[in-house]
Amino acid sequence: MISALLSRFWGYLVAAGALLSAIWAYLLSRDAGLRKETYIEAKERDHDKADAIRDRVERADDDQLREFDDAGYRD
């Protein structure tokens, strides 16, 4: 009788462990997807900022820069 109760207990324990591990694996995969999306969005923002900086540098006029020649600013 005790062995029958123990065998039933171990079966429930294994089933509960399998359920918990399945939930854990699902949460990990979901978090990995969210991290990947965040990384991609951050890279896009970085590229946009780099493009904006590049555009400002290309539009810089020599006359604008000469205004600050010998102005006493340190490099």
Image (cartoon, rainbow, N blue to C red):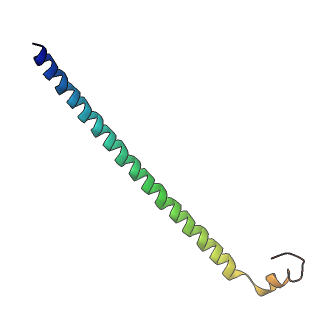
Give the residue displayed 67% in from the left and 82% down from the top: 58
Examine the rendered structure and indicate whether residue 60 appears above or below residue 12.
Answer: below
Residue 52: percent from left, percent from top: 63, 72
74 and 9: which is toward the camera = 9
Examine the rendered structure and indicate whether residue 3 appears above or below residue 34.
Answer: above
Q: In the image, 45: left or right of 58?
A: left
Q: Residue furthest front?
A: 3
Quarter holding residue 67:
bottom right
Residue 56: percent from left, percent from top: 68, 76
Q: In the image, 3: left or right of 12?
A: left
Q: Residue furthest top?
A: 1
Examine the rendered structure and indicate whether residue 52 appears above or below residue 45.
Answer: below
Give the residue displayed 20% in from the left and 25% down from the top: 12
Q: In the image, 71: left or right of 59?
A: right
Which quadrant, please, contains the C terminus? bottom right
Q: In the image, 35: left or right of 54?
A: left
Give the residue displayed 17% in from the left and 27% down from the top: 11
Residue 61: percent from left, percent from top: 75, 84
Examine the rendered structure and indicate whether residue 45 appears above or below residue 57.
Answer: above
Which quadrant, please, contains the N terminus? top left
Residue 34: percent from left, percent from top: 43, 51
Give the residue displayed 33% in from the left and 40% down from the top: 24
45 and 7: which is toward the camera = 7
8 and 65: which is toward the camera = 8
